[in-house]
Image (tube, helix red, strand yellow):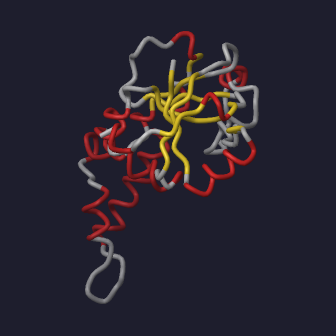
């Protein structure tokens, strides 16, 4: 399987200088209490995270591309082959996404930002109410997202916004930078 990994220009230069793309992301990024089953599926502290090739559209539909750009800058899409057979797992990021919040709770995050304050720059009552809904929903969504974790070997395309986690160190000669336009 090939995956897309997004990074910044600065990080891309660092990868080229070192000759390797290293795993750097904690799989328990929400610092939640994980079940023993989940702990066994993610024995490493750092992983390389990516999107299976052909799945970017699902991320866009779930309104996750903005979040992706926020956390990675989204400047440099890299295509790489999964080489590690043991250790990779996959999650469905659709379960923790702005698209799910909009579909289930009717909250469009872009429009919500406009309603944050009144003319006096105080939080509106509507904002406070919506913030509570978002906070409560995110707790559920985070748990659903984490509990969607399965070994990559068990995955057969059932996720809308799949996210692959690899404990692999990837050599530069196994990485190809691709144009962002190719994904859209």
Q: Residue at x 31, y 75 (%)?
A: 124
Residue 113, image quadrant: bottom left
Residue 143 at what x, y percent from top left? Answer: 52, 35
Q: Which of 128 and 106 is in front in this view?
A: 106
Q: How many labels does the image show?
A: 0
On the picture, is 166 further left or further right than 73? Answer: right
Q: Which of 69 and 136 is in front in this view?
A: 69
Q: Which residue is drawn at 68% across and 38% down?
A: 21
Q: Residue at x 54, y 24 (%)?
A: 90
Q: Look at the picture and state if 171 lies above or below 60.
A: above
Residue 50 at what x, y percent from top left? Answer: 53, 34
On the picture, is 174 further left or further right than 105? Answer: right
Residue 115 at what x, y percent from top left? Answer: 27, 70
On the picture, is 97 further left or further right than 175? Answer: left
Q: Look at the picture and state if 42 lies above or below 97.
A: above
On the picture, is 155 further left or further right than 184? Answer: right
Residue 59, image quadrant: top left
Question: Could you tell me which quadrant the C terminus lies in?
Answer: top left
Q: Nearer the viewer, residue 147 or 163?
A: 163
Residue 14 at what x, y percent from top left? Answer: 69, 51
Q: Residue at x 29, y 60 (%)?
A: 110
Q: Report the residue that reaches farthest toward the bottom.
A: 120
């Amino acid at each position: 399987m090939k995956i897309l990994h997004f990074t910044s220009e600065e990080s891309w230069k660092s990868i080229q200088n070192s000759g390797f793309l290293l795993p750097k992301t904690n799989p328990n990024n929400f610092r939640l209490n994980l079940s023993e089953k989940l702990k066994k599926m993610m024995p490493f502290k750092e992983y390389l995270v990516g999107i299976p090739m052909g799945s970017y559209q699902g991320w866009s539909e779930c309104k996750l591309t903005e979040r992706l750009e926020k956390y990675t800058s989204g400047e440099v899409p890299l295509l790489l082959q999964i080489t590690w057979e043991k250790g990779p797992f996959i999650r469905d990021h659709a379960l923790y996404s702005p698209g799910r919040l909009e579909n289930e709770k009717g909250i469009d995050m872009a429009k919500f930002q406009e309603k944050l304050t009144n003319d006096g720059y105080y939080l509106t009552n509507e904002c406070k109410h919506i913030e509570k809904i978002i906070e409560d929903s995110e707790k559920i969504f985070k748990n659903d997202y984490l509990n969607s974790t399965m070994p990559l070997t068990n995955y057969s395309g059932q996720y809308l916004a799949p996210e692959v986690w690899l404990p692999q160190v990837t050599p530069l000669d196994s990485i190809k930078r691709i144009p962002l336009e190719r994904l859209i």
